[in-house]
């Protein structure tokens, strides 16, 4: 991997972040990344805002931030998504974003999460189609 982040792919930078964490947060971020890629195979991985993993498909689906006590997955348009499994547990007060905070030892329902990711991608694509017409 190159030392200059501008010469390194976003996927490589995300790999490096996961390895650098080396604890439950890295494992959690890796698992959620895998679920995102399973749910939306055409997802684009990006590295934004000085080190935040971002997954996009016709717009941002979600970001993956890591803090000392939590891995936070923030959905750019989460307030517009149905969440029957009640995965969103953070940033609930806003009109746009919603987040899932995952603490050490917590497991997220993989099928419900993938459904949420697909819904985010569908919403992004629906918005792109409206703008074109």
Image (cartoon, rainbow, N blue to C red):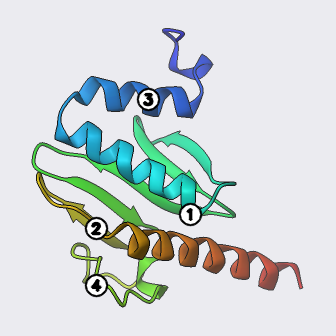
Mark 3 or mark 1: which is in front?
1
| Residue hosting label 2 | 100
Q: Residues within 10 Å of mark 3 (few under 14, many from 20)?
A: some
Spot occupied by residue 37 in the image (x, y as percentages of width and height): 55, 53
The x and y percentages for residue 72 are 27, 57
Number of residues whose C-alpha sits closer than 10 Å to that of mark 2, classed few (under 14), some (14–19) or many (20 or more): many
4 vs 2, front mark:
4
User: What residue would you read off at disc 3?
Assistant: 15
The answer to whether residue 103 is left or right of residue 80 is: left
Q: Are marks 3 and 1 in contact (CB under 8 Å)?
A: no
Q: Nearer the viewer, mark 4 or mark 1?
A: 1
Whether residues under marks 1 and 2 lie with C-beta atoms below 8 angstroms apart, the answer is no
Marks 3/1: CA–CA distance: 19 Å
Residue drawn 42% across the image and 55% down it: 63
Tag 1 residue: 39
Badge 3 marks a residue whose secondary structure is helix
Q: Give the residue drawn at x 31%, y 69%.
A: 99
Q: Are marks 3 and 4 in contact (CB under 8 Å)?
A: no
Structural distance between the alpha carbons of marks 1 and 2: 17 Å
Give the structural element (helix, strand or loop) at label 1: helix
């Amino acid at each position: 991997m190159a030392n200059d982040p501008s010469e390194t792919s976003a996927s490589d930078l995300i790999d490096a972040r996961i390895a650098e964490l080396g604890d439950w947060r890295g494992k959690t971020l890796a698992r959620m990344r895998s679920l995102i890629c399973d749910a939306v195979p055409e997802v684009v991985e990006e590295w934004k805002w000085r080190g935040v993993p971002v997954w996009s498909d016709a717009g941002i689906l979600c970001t993956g931030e890591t803090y000392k006590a939590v891995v936070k997955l923030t959905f750019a348009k989460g307030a517009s998504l149905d969440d029957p499994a009640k995965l969103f547990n953070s940033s609930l007060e806003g009109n746009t974003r919603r987040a899932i905070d995952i603490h050490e030892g917590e497991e997220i329902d993989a099928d419900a999460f993938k459904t949420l990711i697909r819904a985010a991608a569908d919403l992004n694509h629906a918005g792109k189609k409206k703008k074109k017409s």
